[in-house]
Image (cartoon, helix red, strand yellow):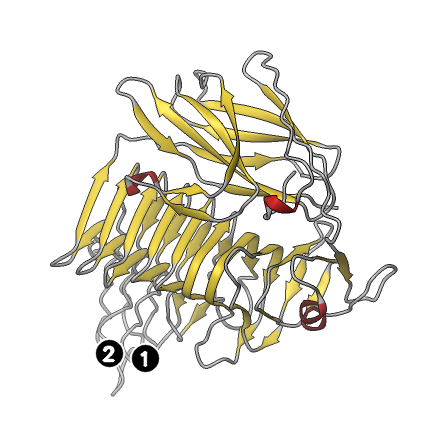
């Protein structure tokens, strides 16, 4: 395995290849970093723990350290000015912040990396922004891997991203059917570069209102940002019902479904092998107090492209949400004046993931899903950062690629696995990505990048 600063190694990584059938065996060696630290956080104060809560641990840990967090409930934290890995133990849920202000990741310097892995955010935020997690003013990389919210908590989870050079969400799940009046985008990105892979994001479902029904929340909103989606699902929240059926506050409308994804003010969006869908509207109902019938509401727009913004969809076209009984479904794609969008429903971008637990001595599989017959290579990097790749429809490419492992043709099943034996200390990491070339007509693709982090 490799860490994020290759100049700190005394020797380069070694890769040894063999090709039985369709498999490639890659043994990836690492010279451990001498100044790396692994610190244990345990709410119960168990054996070997240096801290019992995250705020003190995050503040005290040196840059580049790994915090291994045992199952339990922890307070929200502020991580500022350094790279750090917060690794939740897979033995049970690691929950962050029952109540309180938002957790923050900010001012991460260029070249540094923050990784949050296997964490569950719960409760609500008292911050003025209403955010549960804020990522702001970061020049380095911030990676959320296997992070989710607890959907049944008192108020919705919201992620805010602003002025962030490189934010990656892998295997994240921010959903929940609980209804709320404070509607906003589940993920709101401003002036940032954001990548999502194998993630599910659902807009906030609107609660009952005192008058007309409230529209559902937006799943993902990008303002002056660049966003790439790989094999992910983005959905608008469902509309909310009105509360009064008769009298002075009687409503005649239900809440419409929310927008799945919205790009505006010069934002760019690439949708690769992903589903973008609007939220559902509400059915009509008759008043039991003699008031007017409340009309059903329309479904939400799947993808809305604002003025000066662009969207490119490779794969499934955006879908509108279902309307209530008798009401229209939402439009799949709405392009405002000055916006531009293209859809290629026949393309098949590759997608990749890691299968198995990357603990020392275990075998994991770098799994590629691509068009049968494709040729390509596995790209390995000691860095976690990604950069736009031209043409931009290809998405993003890893920075600092240190090794290129050629792969056999993708078999007729469309799946190719590359096995790797994990070698290295807890907290060591590398990033991986596939490059493929489709058979005739030839076309170059990049898969989603992902991080391999050695766990206990």
Q: Is residue 106 depicted above or below 201 in this figure?
A: below
Residue drawn at 72 percent across, 35 percent down:
423
Q: Quadrant of the N terminus?
A: top right
- Residue 373 falls in which quadrant of the image? top left
Of tags 1 and 2, the one toward the viewer is 1
In the visual, does 419 lie left or right of 284?
A: right
Residue 244, label in figure:
1
Q: Is mark 1 on a helix, strand or loop?
A: loop
User: Left or right of 310: which side holds 91?
Assistant: right
Residue linked to disc 2: 291
Count of residue discs: 2
What residue lies at 68% left-to-right and 55% top-to-bottom?
Answer: 88
Q: Which residue lies furthest to the top in this view?
A: 21
Residue at far right of view? 47
Of the pair 121 and 59, the residue shown nearer to us:
59
Instruction: Give the answer, above or below, for where 281 lies relative to 423.
Output: below
Q: Is residue 148 left or right of residue 233?
A: right
> Residue 196 versus residue 245: which sits nearer the camera?
196
SS assignment at label 2: loop
> Which residue of the protein is positioned furthest toward the bottom in this rendering?
248
Task: In the rendered structure, find residue 438 and report the number of the disc placed on it.
Answer: none
Residue 198, how many percent across, how many down?
47, 44
Callout 1 touching callout 2 (CB < 8 Å): yes
Q: Point out the tag, 1 or 2, that comes first from the N-terminus.
A: 1
Percent of width and height locating residue 311:
25, 49
Q: Which residue is drawn at 43% across and 54% down?
A: 201
Residue 282 visible (yes or no):
no
Crowd class of label 2 (few under 14; some 14 to 19; many from 20; radius 10 Å): some
Q: Can residue 387 be seen in this view?
A: yes
């Amino acid at each position: 395995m490799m860490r994020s600063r290759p100049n700190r190694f005394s020797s380069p990584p070694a890769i040894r290849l063999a090709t039985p059938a369709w498999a490639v065996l890659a043994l990836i060696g690492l010279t451990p970093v001498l100044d790396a630290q692994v610190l244990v956080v345990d709410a119960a104060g168990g054996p070997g723990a240096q801290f019992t809560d995250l705020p003190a641990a995050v503040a005290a840990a040196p840059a580049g350290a790994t915090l291994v967090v045992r199952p339990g409930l922890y307070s929200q934290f502020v991580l500022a000015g350094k790279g750090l890995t917060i690794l939740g133990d897979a033995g049970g849920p690691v929950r962050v912040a029952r109540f309180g202000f938002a957790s923050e990741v900010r001012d991460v310097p260029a070249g540094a990396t923050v990784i949050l892995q296997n964490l569950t955010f719960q409760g609500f935020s008292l911050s003025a922004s209403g955010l549960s997690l804020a990522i702001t003013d970061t020049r380095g990389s911030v990676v959320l891997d296997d992070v989710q919210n607890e959907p049944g908590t008192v108020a919705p989870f919201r992620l805010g991203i602003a002025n962030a050079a490189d934010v990656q969400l892998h295997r994240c799940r921010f959903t929940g059917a609980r209804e709320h009046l404070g509607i906003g985008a589940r993920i709101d990105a401003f002036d940032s570069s954001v990548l999502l892979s194998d993630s599910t994001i659902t807009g906030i479902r609107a609660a009952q209102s005192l008058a007309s029904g409230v529209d559902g929340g937006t799943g993902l909103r990008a303002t002056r940002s660049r966003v790439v989606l790989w094999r992910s699902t983005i959905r608008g929240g469902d509309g909310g019902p009105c509360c009064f059926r008769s009298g002075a506050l009687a409503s005649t409308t239900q809440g419409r479904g929310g927008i799945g994804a919205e790009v505006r003010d010069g934002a760019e969006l690439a949708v690769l092998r992903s589903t973008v869908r609007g939220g559902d509207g509400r059915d009509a109902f008759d008043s039991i107090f003699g008031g007017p019938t409340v009309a059903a509401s329309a479904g939400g727009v799947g993808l809305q492209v604002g003025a000066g913004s662009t969207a490119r969809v490779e794969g499934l076209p955006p879908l509108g949400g279902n309307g209530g009984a008798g009401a229209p479904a939402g439009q799949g794609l709405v392009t405002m004046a000055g916006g531009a969008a293209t859809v290629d429903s026949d393309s098949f971008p590759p997608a990749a993931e890691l299968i198995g637990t990357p603990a020392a001595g275990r075998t994991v599989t770098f799994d590629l899903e691509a068009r049968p017959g494709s040729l390509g290579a596995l790209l390995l990097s000691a860095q976690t950062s990604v950069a736009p790749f031209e043409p931009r429809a290809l998405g993003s490419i890893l920075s600092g690629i240190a090794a290129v492992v050629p792969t056999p043709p993708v078999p007729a099943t469309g799946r190719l696995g590359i096995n790797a034996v994990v070698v290295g200390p807890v907290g060591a990491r590398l990033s991986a990505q596939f490059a493929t070339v489709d058979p005739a007509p030839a076309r170059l693709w990049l898969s989603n990048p992902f991080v391999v982090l050695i766990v206990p």
